[in-house]
Amino acid sequence: MENTKQDLNIKMQARNMDLSYGSFKALEDINIDIYEKQVTALIGPSGSGKSTFLKSLNRMNDLVEGCKITGDITLEGKDIFNRDLDVNQLRKNVGMVFQHPNPFPMSIYDNVAYGPRTHGIKDKEKLDQLVEESLKGAAIWDEVKDDLGKNGLAVSGGQQQRICIARALAVKPDVLLMDEPTSALDPISTLKVEELIQELRKDYTIVIVTHNMQQAARVSDYTAFFYADPEKGGGHSTIIEFGETEQIFNNPNNEQTADYVAGRFG
Ligand SMILES: Nc1ncnc2c1ncn2[C@@H]1O[C@H](COP(=O)(O)OP(=O)(O)OP(=O)(O)O)[C@@H](O)[C@H]1O
Ligand SMILES: [Mg+2]
């Protein structure tokens, strides 16, 4: 937007990254710079590896048996696969919000306090403050402040998603990964989450997967287009174009990108 690339710090970076699920090579030669305090949208057809890449950024794929990654991913220049790195600390720094709102079956308060508690914060006053701050940060405080004891599942889907965003914010991450965070929401809740992303980008680095081209154009500063060349017989998906969102949408260099953002396949 108002920034130029030269002013921006690189928060995360992937270099020559490949990922296989067993013998299936899902991603091949992924290279991307994720700029600090910018919103980066990951777009591309279904099965092009957007979620796979997103989950690699906080090593959620460690939980998938047979998943193997080669190449480099760094956070502030440090290798996230380094054996000395504490993966819990990585996931604290790089938080995640999923496609379907998934509050835990417990009170709104306990949902948001969950992360800080697992990181050893027990002080009631401190927790109260974190819960309030996080719910405010997720633009849902006013709607739930008188009902913090209510079950996190007993509110609307849009409210649940903002509670999940508050839960992610409560551990004070630097990077927020969002995998299609509005695809299960109604238009008004979607708008609220999009407005929230605009607020959050002031303090956080955000990477968002979306199938909604208007949404990518509205909320993101940079866009990466994932594409699996069908001639490779499945998988081997890569980022075939990356750039400022405005350029990707208005003046793409690549024919597939042009066709995709114009809705000609998908
Ligand atoms: N756990 C897994 N084990 C084996 N293959 C997987 C696994 N997860 C994903 N895949 C495969 O990896 C490829 C990329 O999947 P991924 O879910 O990352 O795509 P996507 O771009 O997020 O798609 P969508 O837009 O439908 O969410 C697909 O071919 C998929 O079938
Ligand atoms: Mg996906």
Image: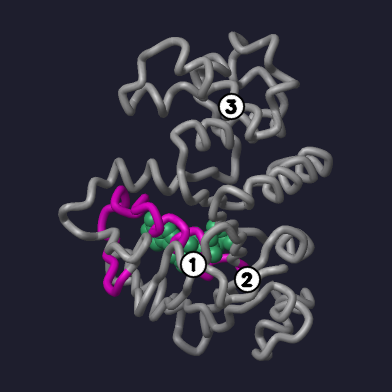
Query: How far apart, in angstroms, are the residues tagged by discs 3 and 2?
Result: 30 Å
Q: Does residue 168 sit above or below 61 in this rendering?
A: above
**Identity of the amino acid at label 2?**
Thr
The quadrant of the rendered image in which ligand 2 is seen is: bottom right
Separation of residues labelled 2 and 1 (CA atoms): 17 Å
The residue furthest left is 83
| Point 76% across, 46% down: residue | 195
Of labels 2 and 1, the one closer to you: 1
Amino acid type of the residue that numbered disc 3 sits on in the rendered structure: Glu
Residue sitting farthest toward the front: 7
Q: Residue flagged by tag 1: what amino acid is it?
A: Asn
CA distance for labels 3 and 1 = 27 Å
Give the SS element for disc 3: helix
Q: Who comes first in sequence, dot 3 or dot 1?
A: 1
Residue 180 position (above or below residue 169): below
List the residue tagged with mark 2. Answer: 223
Looking at the image, the residue that sits furthest to the right is 188
The span picked out in magenta is 43-72
Q: Is 189 located above or below residue 73 in the figure? A: above
Viewer-proximal residue among 92 and 261: 92
Which residue is painted at 16% across and 53% down in the image? 84
Q: Are marks 3 and 1 in contact (CB under 8 Å)?
A: no
Q: Is 264 left, or right, of 31 in this rendering?
A: right
145 drawn magenta: no
The image position of residue 132, as x and y in percent, is 59, 21
Report the disc number at residue 133: 3
Q: Position of residue 250 (x, y in %)?
A: 78, 81
Residue drawn at point x = 47 percent, y = 74 percent: 32
Residue occupied by mark 1 = 9
